[in-house]
Image (spheres, grey):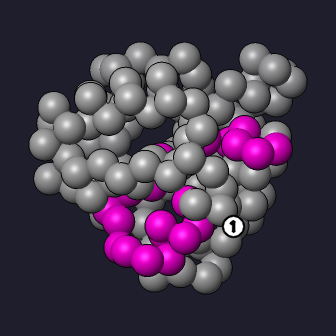
Amino acid sequence: MAEILIIDDDPDIVESMRIILECCRHTVKVAKSGEEGLKAAGAAKYDLIILDVMLETMSTGFEVARNIRTGFNNQNVPILLLTAIKESTGLDFGNVAGDKDWLPVDAYLEKPLKPNELLAKVESLLKGR
C-alpha cells in the first residue's frame, strides 16, 4: 500500500480519485493548490504524486513538478500528471512524454479520468519504483 499525494483543485475529481485509491488500500493526502502541494511534498515522503496541470494558472502543475524534481526529498518520486489541456489547447503530451527535461513527470493521463486507467497507471508507476 502506498502513500499518495494528490495535488488538484477540483473537489469532485479529488474525491473520486480518493475513493478509487483508498479502495485499493492506498493512503491519500490532498493539496488544493500548487503552493499547498509544494508544502506537502516538502514535509513528507510519498510513493507517488498525482498532479493536475491547471491549478492557479495553466502552467502551475509544470512549475510544481520542476520544484519537486529539484528541491525536495520527493525528487525521485513518480509523478503522474493529470491534464485536460489537450482539450483546451490542443497540446498533446504524447509528443514529449519521454522528455523529462521538458516535462519532468513519469506519466500523464487525460481528464476525464477512467477509474481502470487511473488504477492501471498508478500500479504501473508504483511497481517501477
Give residue 52's position: percent from left, percent from top: 61, 41
Does residue 103 appear anywhere in the picture? no
Q: Which portion, as a residue range, is magenta? A: 37-57
Amino acid type assigned to the residue bearing label 1 in the image? Arg
The x, y position of residue 90, in whole percent, is 84, 22
Query: Does residue 40 appear anywhere in the picture?
Result: yes
Q: Is residue 87 above or below residue 109?
A: above
Using residue 8 as the reference point, say whether residue 74 is left or right of it.
left
Q: Nearer the viewer, residue 78 or 5?
A: 5
Residue 62: image location, x then y, percent: 73, 54
Which residue sits furthest right?
89
Binning the other alpha carbons within 10 Å of mark 1 as few (below 14), some (14 to 19) or many (20 upward) gives: some
Q: Is residue 97 above or below residue 63?
A: above
Quadrant for residue 18, please give it: top left
Q: Residue at x 70, y 43 (%)?
A: 55
Residue sitting at 75 percent across and 17 percent down?
Answer: 87
Q: Is residue 111 magenta?
A: no
- How many numbered markers are drawn? 1
Q: Is residue 52 magenta?
A: yes
Residue at x 75%, y 24% (from the top left corner): 86
In front here: 104 or 60? 60
Vertically, is 109 above or below 66? Answer: above
Q: Could you tell me which residue is drawn at 44 percent across and 33 percent down? A: 14
Q: Quadrant of the C terminus?
A: bottom left
Q: Secondary structure at mark 1?
A: helix
Q: Which residue is mark 1?
A: 66
Q: Is residue 62 left or right of residue 15?
A: right
The one nearer the camera, 108 or 7, is 7
- Residue 53 sits in which quadrant? top right
Q: Position of residue 78 (x, y in %)?
A: 44, 59
Residue 48 sits above or below residue 46 on the image: above
